[in-house]
Amino acid sequence: MSNNVKIVVFVPESHADAVRQAMSGAGAGKIGNYTNCSFSSKGIGRFQPEAGANPAIGEVGKLEAVEEGRIEMVCPREVLTSVIAAIKKVHPYEEVAYDIYPIEIE
């Protein structure tokens, strides 16, 4: 198994650059002699805040649809916790949606 994972985070387009920079600054996105490597795609994120939520976008009890970016970066396992903390520091959402995928070989 590789020392790296792929981390994917979903973020409103308005905050995509800040999240991308935070991830790189914490050690994600390095491939060989290149830094700040990422892949982005666009989509629609849907959610409905429930009682007790404090949504950055939308209203409690109302279904919301937001134009979001999907940001993918390679990340060394040893800095993964720091990268997640950096994402959460700049991400506008109360609950940050992210996925972590193992990389089998490099």
Image (cartoon, helix red, strand yellow):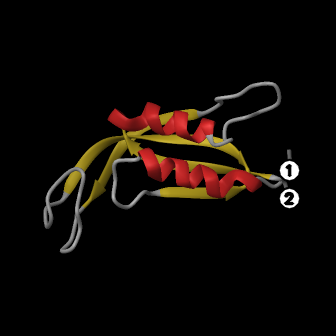
Give the amino acid at mark 1: Ile
Classed neighbour count for the residue bearing mark 2: other residues with Cα under 10 Å, few (<14), some (14–19), many (≥20): few
Give coordinates of residue 8: x percent, y percent: 56, 49
Task: Between residue 79 and residue 2, name the one nearer to us.
Answer: 79
Does residue 57 sit above or below 15 in this rendering? below
Check residue 1 in the rendering and tell me which mark sits there, or answer none. Answer: 2
The residue lying furthest to the bottom in this view is 51
Check residue 39 in the rendering and tell me which mark sits there, or answer none. Answer: none
Q: Residue at x 70, y 28 (%)?
A: 35
CB under 8 Å between callouts 1 and 2? yes
Judging from the image, what secondary structure is the residue with disc 2 in? loop
Q: In the image, is 30 to the left or to the right of 9?
A: right
Does residue 52 sit above or below 84 in this rendering? below
> CA separation, marks 1 and 2?
6 Å
Quadrant occupied by the N terminus: bottom right
The answer to which image quadrant residue 77 occupies is bottom right
Quadrant occupied by the C terminus: top right
The answer to which image quadrant residue 94 occupies is bottom left
Classed neighbour count for the residue bearing mark 1: other residues with Cα under 10 Å, few (<14), some (14–19), many (≥20): few
Give coordinates of residue 45: x percent, y percent: 33, 50
Give coordinates of residue 18: x percent, y percent: 45, 34
Q: In the image, is 81 to the left or to the right of 10?
A: right
Give the amino acid at mark 2: Met
Name which of mark 1 and mark 2 comes first in the sequence. 2
**Total numbered circles:** 2
Q: Residue at x 56, y 54 (%)?
A: 84
Q: Residue at x 21, y 71 (%)?
A: 50
Does residue 82 sit above or below 71 in this rendering? below
Judging from the image, what secondary structure is the residue with disc 1 in? loop
Residue carrying label 1? 105
Task: Between residue 52 and residue 4, name the one nearer to us.
Answer: 52
Q: Residue at x 56, y 57 (%)?
A: 99
